[in-house]
Image: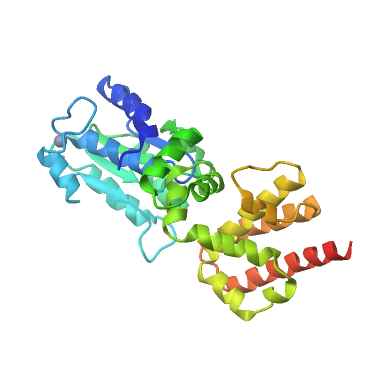
Amino acid sequence: MSLPWLEEHKNALNERLEAGRLGHAPLIQGPEGVGKRELARWLAERMLCLDPKGREPCGQCRACELMASGTHPDFFGIDIPEDRKSIPVDSIRGLIEKMQLTPSVGAARVGLFVDADAMNRNAANALLKTLEEPSPGAWLVLCSDQPASLPATIRSRCQKLALRPPPLDIAGQWLAEVCGEVDEPSRRAALVLAGGAPLAARAMLEHGEFERGLTILETLVEPAADRRSSKLLEDWQQDAIGTWQWLARWLALMMNRVRGVASADLPMADRLPADLPPEHLARLWEQALQGRLGASAGSVRQDLSLGKWLLEWEALMESRSRR
Ligand SMILES: [Zn+2]
């Protein structure tokens, strides 16, 4: 899949790589859904390729074949283990050990972190030593959408590359190509709701997340009696992270509406009330963000937290109808 807005970054990375000016630990940072992992993967393939064709990995050499089949012995992908919530120190120790071996295929070894900020504190400390004393030919490629949560000592030893959402017309054109079956207004709305991040917008449209968001919006504005069903919280906690995310999105839009800011690409936002007290909206928005963090960290009884949030929302809507 080609992501046209990454082209300039590939050119820049390739130039630095060829001139020997690329630090041994590039940190690709930017919001979710702008193509950090895709760029990092491309860079790893480019670093390992034995016979690059201009800027691109050749796709034919032994290294490229091994990468394509997921069996390159000098490539190490680091991610959160399935049974864990963070990258543990053991993963990093294992990586460091492997990075010190002589490469089996070419001259390079690459460790790739798709989510570097998922390292726990011990893991980050263990990695620091490797960042301070890199062995020749060893690359660490890090991706992060929360770089501020990486220790400053790690960040300062990485070469930072910031990915931003592309201009809306470029993102919109790409989305039309990959989600052609979705109507144009929905594509535009998804793009705006995803903060302009094209991959996030596509995921929203492809996985039914967009429809789910609209359902949550309807729930928020429907008469109070319709919200009082135990089925609702059951539905909401099925995907608590997603629910919190949508609550935060709709709240952010309501805060915009109170300030008189509206987006022509989001006609559904007109369904949201524009006359709620901003300080209450801000509090509910904050709670939704906290809720999402909690749900991501695996905290239990999301039905209780969501139920508590809903009660506050109820009180706010009631105060509105009394005014
Ligand atoms: Zn190759």
Picture coordinates of residue 192, whole percent (x, y):
55, 44
Quarter of the rendered structure image containing ligand 1: top left
| 292 vs 177: above or below | below
Q: How many marks?
A: 0
Apparent side of residue 158 relative to residue 304 in the rendered image (left or right): left
| 196 vs 183: above or below | above
**Residue 29 visible to the viewer:** no
The scheme the figure's colours follow is rainbow
Residue placed furthest toward the bottom: 230
Q: Residue at x 33, y 34 (%)?
A: 133
Apparent side of residue 40 relative to residue 157 in the rendered image (left or right): left
Please name whichever residue, 161 or 86, is drawn nearer the observer in this view of the structure.
161
Q: Residue at x 69, y 56 (%)?
A: 271
**Residue 153 visible to the viewer:** yes
Q: Quick one: quadrant of the C terminus?
A: bottom right
Picture coordinates of residue 197, whole percent (x, y):
48, 42
Picture coordinates of residue 288, whole percent (x, y):
64, 58
Please name whichever residue, 120 or 38, is drawn nearer the observer in this view of the structure.
38
Q: Quick one: quadrant of the N terminus?
A: top left
Picture coordinates of residue 301, whole percent (x, y):
58, 74
Q: Residue at x 38, y 54 (%)?
A: 89
Q: Residue at x 30, y 22 (%)?
A: 15
Residue 158 sits in quarter: top left
Apparent side of residue 3 relative to residue 295 in the rendered image (left or right): left
Apparent side of residue 188 relative to residue 247 in the rendered image (left or right): left
Residue placed furthest toward the right: 323
Residue placed furthest toward the top: 19
Please name whichever residue, 83 or 135, is drawn nearer the observer in this view of the structure.
83
